[in-house]
Image: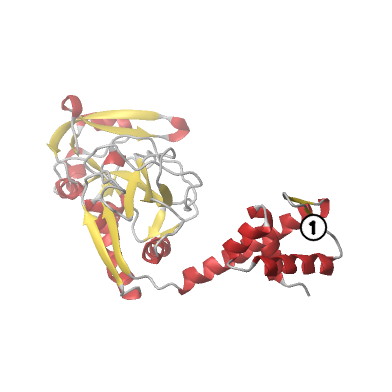
Amino acid sequence: MHDLNDMRYFAEVVDHGGFASAARALDLPTSRLSRRIARLETDLGVRLLHRSTRKLSLTAAGEQYYRHCTAVRDQADQAHAELDRILAEPRGPLRVSCPVTLAQTTIGPLIPGYLARHPKVRLDMQVSNRVVDLVEEGVDVALRVRATLDDSGSAIIKQLGLSHGLLVASPDLLRRHGRPAQPADLDRFDAVGLSAPGGKVRLRLFGPQNARHEAACRPACVVDDLMTLRFAILGGIGIGMLPDYMCHEDIERGRLERILPAWSLASGIVHAAYLSRRGMLPALRSFLDYLGETLVQNPSGDLVGVTPLHDANAMAGAAPAKPRAATPSPRPARPDRASGRGGK
């Protein structure tokens, strides 16, 4: 049986263009490396290299063998890296950025379980709706929700799932004013919203067969915080749009009711943004793996188990997001530069 180390040695000689430089890279005497390659050629019964005083070149057989050697070497390196990853214990500081509502409703409840599993990690979670710069602020990972993903910059993204906006109202309001049967009926209702451009709370709806409708409702109340928005809707002040993760329990317990369920509202892609997969700290990898385990998805990509996520920016009127696989993007994504109340 051939010594697999000789395959690595041969690949290194070819990569470095000679025995001397390859020997330095391998920390071996040049004479020993030369003897190993000569023995390899003897064992194989074929010449792999053309040798001269000026340069080395591959024979036809050597070219084919080199391709196989590099494949074996790369697979071995990958196997060692995977084992190192498994054996490396997550420890040390981990800086995470997360929007306020996302942290309060979904990520926050997961933190005790993560730290119980990895007690040597020192988690520094920055809970803020301010957009962070991963490089300048030394943030390891930013959790974000966006209607689309920007694939043109330097950050790597890992999609975690989807979230949807729901149009809801309190039972008391519906008893007093009736239930809208079609999108056009919304214009006669007071509404609660995050903004009221032109003096109206605007609700963008997407219906069957690509139908669209924008309702312009009277603003009973305008707030810049999703939790306050929820309380206002619960109090019967007006109809409004809430992310599914915030209102699903209210709907189940009868505190809120869905309006026009055949029509969808703004959707968001929940994802993590970080700078590089190479040299990823075990603490960061373990945190991303933990989110992948606990933020369970259904076949459509919607988050289930732990309630789905959303933020104010994704509720600003974008069409429902298209689902994508919850894996790191093959192309890097630019860190978010857009400003907004709920963006992160």
Residue 287 drawn above or below residue 265 = below
- Quarter of the view holding residue 154: top left
- Foreground residue, 259 or 165? 165
Q: Position of residue 99 (x, y in %)?
A: 25, 50
The residue lying furthest to the front in this view is 53
Q: Position of residue 286 (x, y in %)?
A: 40, 66
Position of residue 10 in the picture relative to residue 194 (left or right): right
Q: Residue at x 67, y 55 (%)?
A: 18
Name the residue carrying label 1: 48
The residue lying furthest to the top in this view is 198
Residue 89 drawn above or below residue 222 = below
Secondary-structure class at tag 1: loop
Position of residue 216 in the picture relative to residue 325 (left or right): left
- Foreground residue, 258 or 78? 78
Residue 71 visible in the snapshot = yes
Q: Residue at x 42, y 29 (%)?
A: 211
Mark 1: few/some/many CA within 10 Å (<14, 14-19, 20+) = many
The residue lying furthest to the right in this view is 45
Q: Position of residue 140 (x, y in %)?
A: 33, 56
Q: Position of residue 224 (x, y in %)?
A: 16, 41
Residue 255 visible in the snapshot = no
- Quarter of the view holding residue 176: top left
Q: Residue at x 40, y 73 (%)?
A: 89
Position of residue 129 in the picture relative to residue 158 (left or right): left
Give the amino acid at mark 1.
Leu
Q: What colouring method underlies this structural image?
A: secondary structure
Q: Quadrant of the N terminus?
A: bottom right
Q: Residue at x 82, y 55 (%)?
A: 61
